[in-house]
Image: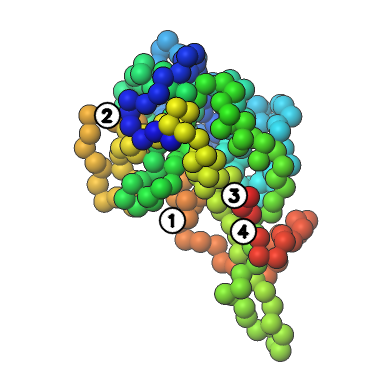
Amino acid sequence: MNFSPGGPRSVAPIPRILHAIWIGDESRRPDRCLNSWRDMHPGWEFRLWGNAEYRGRRWKSHAQMEIFHALGMWEGIADLMRYEILQEHGGVYVDADSICVRPLDDWLLDLRLFAIWESERHRPGLIANGFIGCIPGHPAMDDLVAATARMARRPFRRSWRSLHLKGLRLAFVWDSVPAWQIVGPLLFTRVLRRYPADDVTVLPSVMFLPKHFLDAAERASSMIYSRHEWGTTQILLGTAPRPSPVAAPPDGLPLPASGSAGLP
């Protein structure tokens, strides 16, 4: 991987297509944020992928999507959709709850694939998947889609630390596993780390995430393209209060394999 803005150049540029996804309750869609990206890029194609698009095609990762859908884990569906969208169309994916503050520069489109660190301070080594630009058919996207297309993993794991008594019996507790640990930044980071500097460029987090949800204040920089509205993503990143362990997964979902964390 390459870690500087002056990364390797692609022969064919990243297409001028902005992708955003909003799955679930459309009445809560952050249109102000979405419109900021559209307004800042008048010469670009803007594609909003919603419930109709989700239901209107056969996704390669449909098995995992259906599991997430049954549990209302919309962020997991959005993770899976963005990989397949970028694999097929290329372009730049942006989180729907981010606000664009200045247009993307042309040099970004000369890269083969770019992403950003989530936070060099709070999450060192973790690559965010909320802002991704790439050419169509990038091999990293091929690898991500190949991995998620094989998934049908229930987002629960047996907790060996949460044994409790039921009368005179010991019973295991099943903890929920957030989508970001199954198909989000953890998987994204593992795949991107396989690629050399002429394929993947990881940019400083301040360019798209100048204020991490653990930061007390926004960092100053002349390189900032967007600001993130963390309110809608705290749950999927594990900073909101975690749900209590459950004695068994919800009805209709088979138990995961013993000790499985849902990771490849």
Count of numbered labels shown in the rendering? 4
The three-letter code of the residue at mark 4 reads: Ala
Q: Nearer the viewer, residue 192 or 46?
A: 192
Please name the residue that numbered disc 2 is placed on.
223
For numbered disc 2, what is the local secondary structure? loop
The three-letter code of the residue at mark 3 reads: Ile
Q: How crowded is mark 3: few (under 14 residues within 10 Å), some or many (20 or more)?
A: many
Badge nearest the viewer, 1 or 2:
2
For numbered disc 4, what is the local secondary structure? loop
Query: Viewed as shown, does residue 82 lie left or right of 228?
Result: right
Q: In which quarter of the image is residue 144?
A: top right
Residue 261, numbered label: 4
Q: Quadrant of the N terminus?
A: top left
Please name the residue that numbered disc 1 is placed on.
239
Give residue 122's position: percent from left, percent from top.
35, 52
Give residue 102's position: percent from left, percent from top.
31, 23
Q: Which of 221 and 21 is in front in this view?
A: 221
Please name the residue that numbered disc 3 is placed on.
182
Marks 1 and 2, how far apart in space?
Answer: 27 Å
Marks 4 and 1, how far apart in space?
Answer: 19 Å
Mark nearer the N terminus (4 vs 1): 1
Q: How crowded is mark 2: few (under 14 residues within 10 Å), some or many (20 or more)?
A: few
Query: Viewed as shown, does residue 92 lie left or right of 84?
Result: left
